[in-house]
């Protein structure tokens, strides 16, 4: 256990890793928004909702 004393722990992210993670998350959010806001996906979602409402009543 004495060997570990004084060594830096690698638990957690550094500032650069946070920056890369933030950019990756923003890029993923952009792609996801583009997909979800596309006309075809909106049509599919509306069709699913319409079908569900028809089944209920």
Image: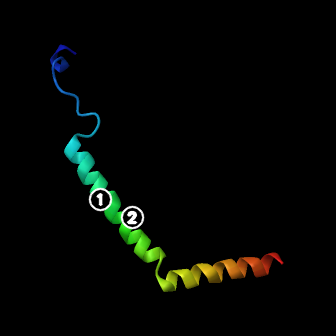
Left or right position of 44 against 17: right
Q: Which residue is mark 2?
A: 29
- Residue 44: quadrant of the picture: bottom right
27 versus 56 height, above or below: above
Left or right position of 56 against 26: right
Secondary structure of the residue carrying numbered label 2? helix
**Is mark 2 in CB contact (under 8 Å) with mark 1?**
no
**Mark 2: few/some/many CA within 10 Å (<14, 14-19, 20+):** few
- Residue 46: quadrant of the picture: bottom right
Res. 34 mark? none
Distance Cα–Cα, label 2 vs label 1: 9 Å
Task: For the C terminus, give its image quadrant.
Answer: bottom right
Residue 17 percent across, percent down from the top left? 23, 47
Residue 23 percent across, percent down from the top left? 28, 57
N-terminal of the two: label 2 or label 1?
1
Residue furthest right in the image: 57
Q: Residue at x 27, y 46 (%)?
A: 18
Task: For the N terminus, give its image quadrant.
Answer: top left
Q: Residue at x 75, y 78 (%)?
A: 53
Secondary structure of the residue carrying numbered label 1? helix
Residue 7 percent across, percent down from the top left? 16, 23
Left or right position of 30 against 53: left
Instruction: Between residue 8 and residue 29, name the one nearer to us.
Output: 29
Residue furthest top in the image: 2
Res. 24 mark? 1
Q: Residue at x 59, y 78 (%)?
A: 45
């Amino acid at each position: 256990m004495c060997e570990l004393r004084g060594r830096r722990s690698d638990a957690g992210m550094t500032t650069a890793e946070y920056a890369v993670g933030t950019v990756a998350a923003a890029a993923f959010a952009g792609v996801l928004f583009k997909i979800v806001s596309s006309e075809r996906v909106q049509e599919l979602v509306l069709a699913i909702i319409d079908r569900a409402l028809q089944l209920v009543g």
